[in-house]
């Protein structure tokens, strides 16, 4: 079983764009609700705040599953490992549980950065390695190059976006997907259908959306600043969407609404 699919780790708390005291208190809120997996990145400039949250709330290291991601500015042999050591120092950890390449190499050739990622694991800086925002082709190439060591591809995944190609590639390559922008940064709430479906189960629109993602076989990352939403997003394991409702939600993927593309992020590849 991929480490990211250990019970409890299928629901991670994302920390972007939280910082400072807001991150520290929100982190504590999420921990108290039950989250044990937390997602940060060099790019979020909040790794030190995550470290402060762990120590302020006196959380035992072994309870947590911490993911961070290497910034593309550090994709060179002289910067890569040093940057990961810098992340660990900020986080106050000897190693992270999962280290991701935040974006593919803009050249489209990821061999160099994948080797550096593997080196980080060999040096013990991380327990496991993965990628983010990789296309189907890149995901397959990465898994072949790293002999099956890639445990996750973290990508935008929600009901308003058709990720069939990526899901197929995930099954073929054995690289599981993990979602970000799981509620499409609120865009899913424009559609009353999710709330209507939720009424059958006594669940909210957000919970229906998150459950749909899980039932696609994709782990979830969610972020909220509000205690009631933080709790609701975690409380998605006590119901199962019927195949009829899954199909009804599948139909929304033709909307093809993306939160993140090259107009917002310079490293974004040409999506599948
Ligand atoms: N790998 C990557 O390139 C990448 C890119 C983007 C994000 N991420 C990761 O994924 C995490 C989440 O992604 P995201 O922030 O882009 O998108 P998101 O989770 O879809 O959206 C977050 C927004 O949705 C609202 N929200 C969350 N749960 C809600 C609920 N139950 N009911 C109503 N509103 C709700 C939050 O508002 P309130 O605060 O008001 O609840 C917040 O404004 C990030 O924190 C980050 O860790 C990774």
Image: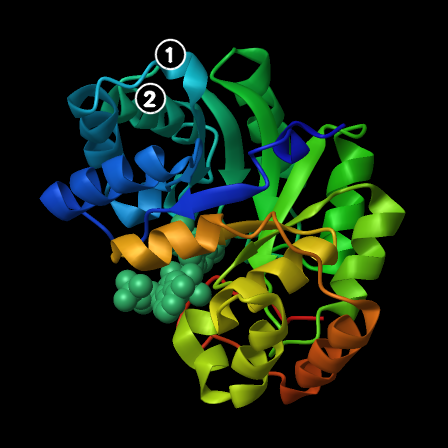
Residue 81 lies, with reference to residue 108, above or below; the image says above
Q: Earlier in the sequence, mark 1 or mark 2?
A: 2
Q: Residue at x 26, y 33 (%)?
A: 50
- Tell me if residue 111 comes above or below residue 187 in the rendering: above
Q: Is residue 119 left or right of residue 218?
A: left
Give the residue pinned by disc 1.
94
Q: Is residue 86 visible?
A: yes
**Element type at marker 1?**
loop
Residue at horizontal 63 percent and vertical 31 percent from the top: 7
Which quadrant of the frame does ligand 1 lie within? Answer: bottom left
* Farthest right residue in view: 172
Give the CA separation, mark 1 to mark 2: 6 Å
User: What is the quadrant of residue 141 in the picture?
Assistant: top right
Judge from the rendering whether residue 262 lies leftward or rightward of residue 168; answer left or right.
left
Relative to the observer, which residue lies in front, 212 or 81? Answer: 212
Q: Are marks 1 and 2 in contact (CB under 8 Å)?
A: yes
Q: Position of residue 138 (x, y in %)?
A: 72, 52
Query: What is the secondary structure assignment of the residue under circle 2?
Result: helix
Q: Which mark is residue 40?
A: none
Image x and y of residue 221, in percent: 49, 50
Identify the residue under disc 2: 88
Q: State the residue in front, 193 or 158.
A: 193
State which quarter of the image contains the C terminus.
Answer: bottom right
Q: Is residue 95 visible?
A: no
| 174 sits to left or right of 268 | right
Image quarter of residue 161: bottom right
């Amino acid at each position: 079983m991929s480490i990211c699919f250990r019970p409890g780790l299928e629901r991670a708390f994302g920390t972007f764009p939280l910082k400072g005291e807001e991150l520290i208190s929100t982190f504590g809120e999420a921990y108290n609700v039950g989250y044990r997996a937390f997602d940060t990145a060099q790019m979020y400039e909040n790794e030190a705040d995550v470290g402060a949250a762990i120590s302020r709330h006196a959380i035992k290291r072994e309870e947590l599953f911490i993911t961070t991601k290497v910034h593309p500015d550090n994709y060179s042999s002289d910067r890569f490992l040093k940057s990961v050591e810098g992340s660990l120092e900020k986080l106050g950890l000897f190693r992270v549980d999962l280290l991701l390449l935040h974006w593919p190499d803009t050249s489209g050739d990821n061999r160099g950065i994948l080797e550096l990622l593997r080196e980080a694991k060999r040096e013990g800086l991380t327990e496991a390695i993965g990628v983010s925002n990789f296309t189907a082709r890149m995901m397959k190439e990465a898994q072949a190059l790293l002999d099956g060591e890639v445990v996750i591809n973290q990508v935008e995944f929600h009901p308003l976006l058709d990720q069939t190609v990526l899901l197929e590639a995930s099954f073929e390559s054995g690289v599981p997907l993990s979602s970000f922008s799981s509620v499409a940064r609120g865009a899913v709430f424009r559609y009353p259908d999710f709330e209507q479906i939720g009424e059958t189960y006594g669940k909210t629109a957000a919970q229906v959306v998150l459950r749909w993602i899980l039932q696609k076989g994709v782990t979830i990352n969610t972020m909220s600043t509000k205690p009631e939403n933080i709790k609701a997003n975690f409380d998605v394991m006590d119901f199962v969407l019927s195949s009829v409702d899954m199909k009804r939600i599948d139909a929304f993927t033709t909307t093809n609404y993306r939160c993140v593309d090259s107009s917002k992020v310079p490293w974004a590849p040409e999506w599948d």
